[in-house]
Image (tube, helix red, strand yellow):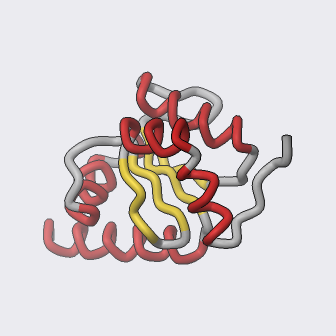
Amino acid sequence: MEENKIIDVTEMIKNEIKSNDIVLFMKGTPVFPMCGFSAAVVQILTDIGVKFNSINVLDSNEMREGIKQFSNWPTIPQLYIKEEFVGGCDIVKEIYESGELLQLLNRKGIEVKSR
C-alpha cells in the first residue's frame, strides 16, 4: 500500500512540473507561507513578476516526503523551472542576487515583468 502512494506522488510531481513552467514546492501558500524560506522564494518570484504554481507540501505527508525523494534534495522549498530542479531557498537567493535567475528564465523563454 505505501509503495502505491509513493508512485502516485511521483506521478503527481512529474505531472505538476510538466504542465507548469515554474513550480514551487513550499510550506504553506504564496499568500500565507508557513516558513521563512518559502516566504523568501515567493518574494523573489513575485519581485521578478513571473507566474508560478505552488504546491503546499504541508497538505500531504506523502507529498512532503515524495518531493524530497524525487529531487534528492532534503529541504523545502524546492523550485522547478521548465522541469529543471533549480534548488532551495539559498540557491534561489544566490542566483537571484547574481542575476543568474533572470538569465535562466530568459533562456527558458519565460516572460518576466519588465522594470
Question: For this view, does 13 lie left or right of residue 101?
Answer: left
Where residue 3 appears, as percent x and y from the top left, is 14, 72
Q: Residue furthest right?
A: 115
Camera-nearest residue between 43 and 91: 91
Q: Residue at x 51, y 29 (%)?
A: 40
Q: Quick one: quadrant of the N terminus?
A: bottom left
Up-down: is 90 above or below 80?
Answer: above
- Name the residue located 70 percent from the left edge and 65 percent from the top edge: 110
Q: Residue at x 52, y 41 (%)?
A: 98
x, y percentage for residue 90?
37, 36
Quarter of the figure with residue 6: bottom left
In percent of width and height, residue 14 lies at: 42, 75
Q: In the rendered view, would you say 18 is above or below 95? A: below
For the C terminus, the image quarter is: top right
Between residue 65 and residue 60, name the one nearer to us.
Answer: 65
- Count the numbered circles shown: 0
Q: Residue at x 14, y 66 (%)?
A: 2
In the rendered image, the residue lying farthest to the left is: 2
Task: Say which quarter of the image contains residue 7.
Answer: bottom left
> Is 106 situated above or below 90?
below
Quick one: which residue is furthest to the front in this view?
Answer: 98
Q: Closest to the observer: 105 or 62?
A: 105
Residue 82 appears left or right of 85? right
